[in-house]
Image: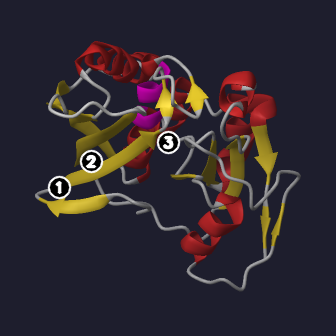
Amino acid sequence: MRNAMDIGGGLILTTDNSGGIGEKPADLIHVPDEVTAYFAARVALVEQWAANAEPVTVLIHNFSGENSWNRYVAGVEKAFSESSMALPKITGSTETNMEMVQSAVAITMIGKQSGLISPIEGLIWRIYGTPLVGDEVVERVGEIAQLQILHDAYRNRIIERLWPVGSKGILHEIQKITGTENVQVQTELEIEKSAGPATAVLLGIRPDMLKQAEQHFGNHLHRLEIK
């Protein structure tokens, strides 16, 4: 697994947070609160799929004030709607005693694992989406890995493994997958650039499913060579 935690009983915990991004005047990036929560939720959701789990509960940790709560809920709902998944129960807490000058929110998901994770041996790796960060996430939305397409591939076993790319970039994630820093990576994408809220995802594909995967993901599936 990547950053997911097995908490026993087949339950998987994933989380993501965001600070200084939202609707407050002092925020560094100004976007609607719904957008902030959506991208935090998509990270936690893709982390669940990477652990072969699907969420049963969502927790929202809201430090932005009461007015942001419903907007954060709407962002979470959007992530599940895009994935064509039933919306789990949403609960959480809002900081109301102290008023923050910048927005801050965390989205935590508890999911149920449906089976063992496939081994990486014999898989062909590709990259779906483009590493993007900051304002690029809003400006180049067409290059972002789409939740519906990912979930369909995951559910229908078009892919065997998926591994979201985080703030340390493609190379770092491949080093984690292979368990070694002595790895060479070739792709047309920037391998050390942050992928922000999992705008790019590594895919492990069986050789016999490669052609179907290429058709499923289309032009946003990028070649990747690992040596």
Q: Nearer the viewer, residue 133 or 49?
A: 133
Q: Which residues are magenta?
A: 35-41
Q: Nearer the viewer, residue 60 or 46?
A: 60
Mark 2 to mark 3 CA distance (whole Å): 13 Å
Q: Residues within 10 Å of mark 2 (few under 14, many from 20)?
A: few
Q: Earlier in the sequence, mark 1 or mark 2?
A: 1
Query: Where residue 125 is drawn, which disc sits there?
Result: none
Residue 37 point in image, percent of width and height: 41, 27
Residue 139 position (above or below residue 222):
above
Answer whether residue 99 is visible to the viewer in this image: yes
Answer whether residue 142 is visible to the viewer in this image: no
Q: With 204 as the anchor, is 73 left or right in this view?
A: left
Q: Closer to us: mark 1 or mark 2? A: 1
Q: Amino acid at mark 3?
A: Arg
Mark 3 to mark 1 CA distance (whole Å): 20 Å
Residue 151 point in image, percent of width and height: 48, 32
Q: Is residue 222 magenta?
A: no
**Mark 3 element type:** loop
Q: Which residue is mark 3?
A: 157
Q: Earlier in the sequence, mark 2 or mark 3?
A: 2
Q: With 86 as the anchor, is 82 left or right in this view?
A: right
The single residue placed furthest to the left in the displayed view is 9
Q: Is residue 36 magenta?
A: yes
Say which quarter of the image contains residue 141.
Answer: top right
Q: With 198 as the anchor, is 46 left or right in this view?
A: left
**Mark 2 element type:** loop
Say which quarter of the image contains residue 222.
Answer: top right
Query: Where residue 114 is drawn, which disc sits there?
Result: 2
Q: Which residue is mark 1?
A: 10
| Pointer 1 with pointer 2, Cβ within 8 A | no
| Pointer 2 with pointer 3, Cβ within 8 A | no
